[in-house]
């Protein structure tokens, strides 16, 4: 069995493809479009490699010129943190306080922007295959007809997001720089369906796309007109019997998981969207979590703050609580897609405080 076959057979395929009605459709004129992140891999990098790219301006990022960081987390596994440009959001989008019912109006009516935050994607080189977690943004997102007939998606996205995507930070450029052919990626694991996590799909031939089944059936803020026409995801569901490495299923705070490869899992992490999932790589008794948009930062999770764009604040807080429990059971490196410190945390194997 080759690596691709292994990946395919190890996935318990989901079933149905239902159109799903986005809750956002109730909140916004049409379906709500949102934001968020991506990653990739390299041929024979040294144990830690920093690649420099121009055009980055974040004032507080320690390595502000680094758009690619490669870390050997063990003799057999290598992870590349790849930045796909920057995103700014309205301040109440990143964190909302106050009257719950005013969450969305406060975002749409706000005229301020946060500082630039990175859009991370992650490439995992693993003995069982090469896995990409999210695919980042692409420069075409600024084109007038990018959203096709979905005028509501276009309006909302452009109202609530400011994207700065240098061409040299698109997925395609990262792969070229790393010397990795697109067809070497065995599977893409999507944390959720927001465009800054999925827009890099256009650079890929048509690999296995692992998409949370709930996210497809019950989308929130997903602009499906931006998906490539070839996209036919393999749906991921999570079950209560799957252990997380040495951690028995009964001790998994998320109460369900899906095994993708040896030490590589997805776990259900709802809150930001109904079907949001995170990717967990357990290697040498440490869990590396590629957390998508569970929170904007680790600090936000630890403080209990919740983003304004969030389908269920209660579910988000429950997911936070489960991460804290997991961090108490296994050293946990927590890496959300827009945290300026995520790549550094990977480099330093800096674990979540408990
Ligand atoms: Zn998102």
Image (spheres, rainbow, N blue to C red):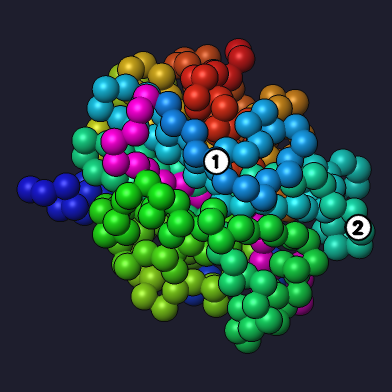
Position of 321 relative to 44 (above/below): above
Which residues are drawn in magenta?
A: 26-47
Residue 36 painted magenta: yes
Q: Nearer the viewer, mark 2 or mark 1?
A: 1
The residue tagged 1 is 52
Is residue 323 among the parts visible in the rendering? no
Quarter of the rendering occupied by the C terminus: top right
**Residue receiving disc 2:** 110
Q: Position of residue 233 (x, y in %)?
A: 36, 64
Residue at figure coordinates x 68%, y 46% from the top left: 56
Mark 1 crowdedness (10 Å alpha carbons): few <14, some 14-19, many ≥20: some
Q: Is residue 90 left or right of residue 223?
A: right
Q: Nearer the viewer, residue 156 or 27?
A: 156
| Residue at image location 34% in from the left, 33% down from the top | 45
User: Image point 43% across, 59% down: which residue?
Assistant: 172
**Secondary structure, magenta segment, majority class:** loop
Q: 225 left or right of 207?
A: right
């Amino acid at each position: 069995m080759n690596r691709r076959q292994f990946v395919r057979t190890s996935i318990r395929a989901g079933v149905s493809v239902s159109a799903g009605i986005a809750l956002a459709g109730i909140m916004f004129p049409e379906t709500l479009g949102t934001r968020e992140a991506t990653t990739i891999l390299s041929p024979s990098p040294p144990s830690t490699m920093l690649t420099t790219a121009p055009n980055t301006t974040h004032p507080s990022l320690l390595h502000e010129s680094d758009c690619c960081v490669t870390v050997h987390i063990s003799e057999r596994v290598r992870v590349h943190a790849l930045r796909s440009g920057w995103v700014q959001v309205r301040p109440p989008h990143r964190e909302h306080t106050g009257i719950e019912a005013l969450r969305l109006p406060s975002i749409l009516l706000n005229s301020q922007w946060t500082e630039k935050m990175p859009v991370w994607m992650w490439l995992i080189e693993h003995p069982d295959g090469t896995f990409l977690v999210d695919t980042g943004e692409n420069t075409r997102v600024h084109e007038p007809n990018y959203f096709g007939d979905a005028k509501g998606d276009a309006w909302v996205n452009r109202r609530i997001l400011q994207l700065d995507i240098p061409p040299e930070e698109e997925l395609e450029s990262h792969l070229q720089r790393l010397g990795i052919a697109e067809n070497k990626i065995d599977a893409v694991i999507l944390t959720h369906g927001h465009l800054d996590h999925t827009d890099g799909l256009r650079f890929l031939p048509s690999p296995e796309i692992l998409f949370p089944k709930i996210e497809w059936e019950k989308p929130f803020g997903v602009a499906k007109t931006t998906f490539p026409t070839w996209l036919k995801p393999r749906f991921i569901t999570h079950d209560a019997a799957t252990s997380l490495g040495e951690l028995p299923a009964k001790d998994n705070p998320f109460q369900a998981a899906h095994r993708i490869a040896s030490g590589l899992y997805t776990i259900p992490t709802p809150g930001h969207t109904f079907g949001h999932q995170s990717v967990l790589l357990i290697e040498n008794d440490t869990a590396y979590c590629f957390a998508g948009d569970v929170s904007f930062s680790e600090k936000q999770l630890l403080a209990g703050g919740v983003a304004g764009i969030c389908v269920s604040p209660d579910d988000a807080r429950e997911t936070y609580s489960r991460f804290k429990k997991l961090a108490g059971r296994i050293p946990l490196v927590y890496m959300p897609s827009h945290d300026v410190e995520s790549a550094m945390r990977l480099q330093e194997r800096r674990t979540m405080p408990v």
